[in-house]
Amino acid sequence: MKLLHIIATPRTYESNTLRIATAYLESVRNKVATLSVDTLDLFGPDLPTAVSDHIAAHYSLLARQPIQKRHLASWQQIERLIEQFLAADRYLITTPMWNLSVPYILKYYIDSIVQPSYLLEHTAAGWPIGLVQNKKMVCIVSHGSDYSVQTPTLCHPHNFLEPYLRAIFGTIGIADIQFITAQPMDVTPELRETAVAAAIVEARQLAANFE
Ligand SMILES: Cc1cc2nc3c(=O)[nH]c(=O)nc-3n(C[C@H](O)[C@H](O)[C@H](O)COP(=O)(O)O)c2cc1C
């Protein structure tokens, strides 16, 4: 079984989210000896940057037209990312909330891999049909503040991170998505450590049911 671990925090050594993900992965590895983990550090490797070429190729695919020759070299980079994504049976996304949603690099990655005829197709009426079937995802996320608290300025509806990840990965066919949320990370050290410890317990419980 292959798990792709997608990391969307640049704070490799200080990341609170990564502390929880590391505990989760350790427990999963103990459970599934044959697990192979592929790590994609989104802030680390060079993600393809020729955005305009990718977007042109995206519209060619939508129109069911061949990709133009001048966009092929850049498209091969996207295909490599897609192949890596599709090679996995299970996904782990480790991400903080940035400005109520995902960090830009995770959005960029999603914009790169979610491509017509690879991860989804469209009906004649334009409705998406997910092509990524029989796969499961765990998202380990952390917030600086606590979005379970209802205040006029900070409340559950302002959390666009979890609904967005559920919506986009659901659209490509991944229906089984579990979340572990640690919050608040940035109020006091005591609250942070309590929340991280609780999330690690939750992560180990989730790992015990990994299949
Ligand atoms: C650019 C940026 C934007 C952020 N925006 C939010 C936010 O909208 N809401 C929130 O609760 N925390 C926000 N935070 C705080 C992070 O979500 C929090 O510190 C998180 O635990 C960091 O995770 P990490 O330690 O894994 O990097 C933001 C942090 C940064 C750097």
Image: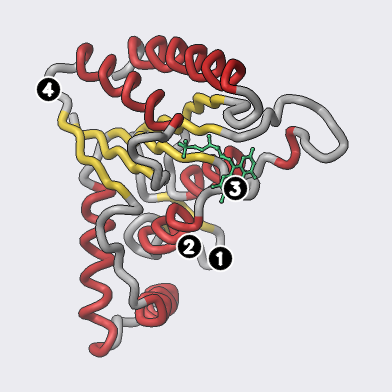
For label 1, the crowd category at 10 Å Cα-Cα, with few meaning under 14, some 14 to 19 and many 20 or more, is: few
Amino acid type of the residue that numbered disc 4 sits on in the rendered structure: Thr
Mark linked to residue 122? 2
Q: Answer with mark 2 or mark 4, whichever residue precedes in sequence.
A: 4
Q: Residue at x 48, y 27 (%)?
A: 178
What residue would you read off at disc 1? 126
Residue 20 in the image: x percent, y percent?
40, 23
**Image height of 63 relative to 169, above or below:** below
Q: Answer with mark 4 or mark 1, whichever residue precedes in sequence.
A: 4
Q: Residue at x 52, y 17 (%)?
A: 193
What residue would you read off at disc 4? 34
Task: Give the mark toward the camera: 2 or 3.
Answer: 3
Real-space CA distance between mark 2 and mark 1, rounded to the nearest whole angstrom: 5 Å
**Image height of 129 relative to 65, above or below:** above
Q: Are marks 2 and 4 in contact (CB under 8 Å)?
A: no
- Describe residue 56's horizontal placement relative to residue 179 as left or right: left
Task: Give the mark toward the camera: 3 or 1.
Answer: 3
| Total numbered labels | 4
What residue would you read off at disc 3? 101
Q: Are marks 2 and 1 in contact (CB under 8 Å)?
A: yes
For label 2, the crowd category at 10 Å Cα-Cα, with few meaning under 14, some 14 to 19 and many 20 or more, is: few
Amino acid type of the residue that numbered disc 1 sits on in the rendered structure: Gly
Amino acid type of the residue that numbered disc 3 sits on in the rendered structure: Ser
SS for tag 3?
loop
Q: Answer with mark 4 or mark 3, whichever residue precedes in sequence.
A: 4
